[in-house]
Image (spheres, helix red, strand yellow):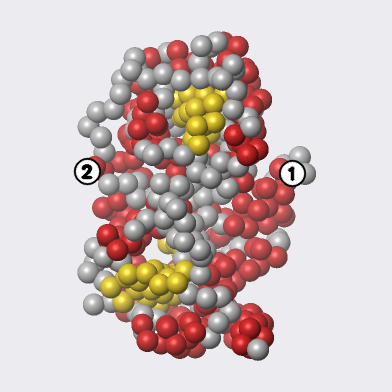
Amino acid sequence: MKKVLVIGYVWPEPNSSAAGTHMMSLLTAFKAQDWQVEFATPAQRTEHMVNLDEYGISSQSIALNCDSFDDYVKAYNPDIVMFDRFMMEEQFGWRVDKHCPNAMKILDTEDLQCLRNARHEAHKGEREFNHSDLHSDIAKREIAAILRCDLSLIISSYEMELLNEVFKVEPSVLHHLPFMVDLSALPEQTKSYEQRQHFMTIGNFRHAPNWDAVLYLQKIWPLIRKQLPQAELHIYGSYPPPKATALNNPKTGFLIKGWADDAYEVMQSARICLAPLRFGAGIKGKLLEAMIMQTPSVTTPIGSEGMHNHLPWPGAITQNAEEFANAAVSIYTNQAEFIAAQKAGNELLHTLYDKAQLNDNLIEKIQLVSQNLSAHRMKNFTGQMLKHHTMRSTQYMSQWIAEKNKK
């Protein structure tokens, strides 16, 4: 039985974020192999975190910059260690290398932080994003973490291309893994066109692209409301701050709903999902949930990026506020367009997001690398060099903090 240690950036919250759902997909995929799985994190426990015990997954709280992790990881002695985002690899990777050198190291990037950050900076500067924006300190840290690991999971096909073509990362250390959808569990029937009403969006308010989308909707919504004066926009998401709840306006139908007990239910009750994302990275959980519940979506090129491989989008992809509003109204009022979007979503789910196929590919890749780990590492000289040089500074800083804390 393989022993897997997953070092999380946060406790998994599948009902709060797509990242939480993706993490649970990975944890349960490992458990399905009859592997022993433990989840460890330095993060604080939260009200919406999942109960891992129910899945047969043990959990452990660990400390940053503390030698106690050394004793912990030596005692657990994992065969595989997966880091949730590059910051966890920076913090704990050198300790794993020191005490469990034969453990296969996997990095789950979730999305490329350097890409999201570069786009955010370009957006704040009110200018177009270009590849030169990627050459940041965050990019250097993130790409270094990818190269130090034996395998990195990349959620978006666009990000795979970016890593190959812009950063020249060898394909052998990358694995494309989008969200995994259990096709056998898809609802046989969802609410009909006539049973649905209003528009909706959903997303963790703490996630900067989601909050920006809410602000952008304030500009878009009057354009929709002008054409559909009885329509409402229901905005759901975890952790709404006071600045968000202050936007609630029943007179204009702009309604901040906050936490949704059942994201799928509120998704299928709406006629259209709106996702006017202006920056970000990875692929978008809300848009996948829309496909699952057969809810057409209107989004942007950023929103749809890496999600449809040039197949028809289940709704519309638009470039500006006016296009966005007009497309939303058109699908909302045209049943034929609505049904065509549903069919496109179903095709995407079966073509790109089949959990059974994606899971088999992932486990096969992990088995292949782990069985030939020494040879695999020999081909990644840059990664070995980075372990030798770059991580020394991180290691010594961490050790200095640990000694300081002892005193």
Q: Secondary structure at mark 1?
A: helix
| Quadrant of the drawing holding the C terminus | bottom right
From the viewer's perspective, is 340 left or right of 113? left
Question: Residue 72 at what x, y percent from top left?
Answer: 42, 83
Question: Residue 353 at what x, y percent from top left?
Answer: 35, 46
Position above or below: 5 against 405? above
| Quadrant of the drawing holding the N terminus | bottom left
The residues bearing labels 2 and 1 have C-alpha atoms spaced at a distance of 43 Å
| Residue lying farthest to the right in this orientation | 125
Q: How many marks?
A: 2
User: Between residues 37 and 68, which one lies in front from this camera angle?
Assistant: 68
Q: Which residue is mark 2?
A: 184
Residue 405 visible somewhere in the drawing: yes
Answer with the quarter of the image where residue 372 lies.
bottom left
Q: Which residue is mark 1?
A: 124
Question: Residue 8 at what x, y percent from top left?
Answer: 46, 66
- Mark 1 residue crowding within 10 angstroms, few (<14) / some (14–19) / many (20+): few
- Residue visible at 59% across and 34% down? 245
Question: Residue 41 at what x, y percent from top left?
Answer: 47, 69
Which kind of residue does numbered mark 1 sit on? Lys
Q: Secondary structure at mark 2?
A: helix
Which kind of residue does numbered mark 2 sit on? Ser
- Residue visible at 22% across and 69% down? 34
